[in-house]
Image (tube, rainbow, N blue to C red):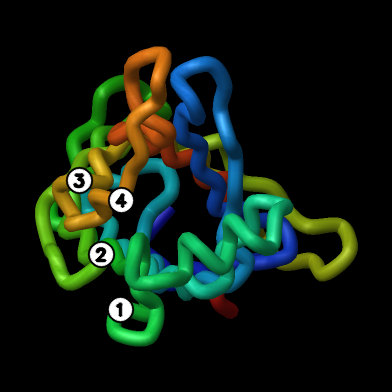
Amino acid sequence: MAVSKWNLDNVHSNVDFSVRHMMVSRVRGSFKDFTANIEADPADLTTANISFTIDVASIDTKNEDRDNHLRSADFFDVENHPNLTFTSTAIERKSDDTYAVTGDVSLHGVTKPETFTVTFEGVAKDPMSGAEKAGFSVEGTIKRSEYGLNWNAALETGGVLVSDDVKINLEIQAAKEA
């Protein structure tokens, strides 16, 4: 395959995250609104250019009060920092279908490099549209404190209410531009 433009299929893509809550369980959430620019050869992502923009106000943790708190100045401060962005800077092949994708993450006014594991899930022709589709799974962890997201509460049993580590999982399907 050659390098081509791929358009994000939002209906078949997800941006999810999880954090430890009260040191005993995980709270999961997702972002509903996101876009991507992908120029890639799915068979060899090492030459890809990838950028992502997530509307952080579109957060959904299945709890309206918590979502509103996450949108507030205590966390994302969506009025002043409406987006989380990622722009790839280096891609290294780790195996036939797995890559370490490094890029600049900008969140809450802070930009720093992060590396995510990306697995190429394959290419198939969509029987409904006839379009060529490619699938990718993305995993990684960021520390929210490194982006100034420091709000927390101490627990009387020890530990804190919300962990610093945020696990990120994306399932991406993209259609090759005609």
**SS label for mark 4:** loop
* Mark 2 or 1, nearer chain start: 1
Residue at the disc numbered 4:
151
The residue beneath circle 1 is 81
Residue at the (42%, 33%) spot, across then down: 161
Q: Earlier in the sequence, mark 3 or mark 1?
A: 1
Point out residue 123 in the picture as x, y percentages from the top left corner.
61, 46
Of residues 36 and 122, which is closer to you in this image?
A: 36
Q: Which residue is mark 3?
A: 145
Q: Secondary structure at mark 3?
A: helix
For the residues labelled 3 and 1, the Cα–Cα distance comes to 16 Å
**Residue at mark 4 to residue at mark 3: CA–CA distance:** 9 Å
Disc nearer the start of the sequence (4/3):
3
Single out the residue that lies furthest toward the right: 128
Name the residue tied to disc 2.
107
Q: Would residue 176 be seen by someone viewing this image from the given angle?
A: no
- Earlier in the chain: of badge 1 and badge 4, it is 1
What element does badge 1 sit on? loop
Mark 2 crowd level (few <14, some 14–19, many ≥20, 10 Å Cα): many
**Is residue 27 shown above or below 81?**
above
* Distance (Cα) linking label 1 and label 4: 16 Å
* Amino acid type assigned to the residue bearing label 4 in the image: Trp
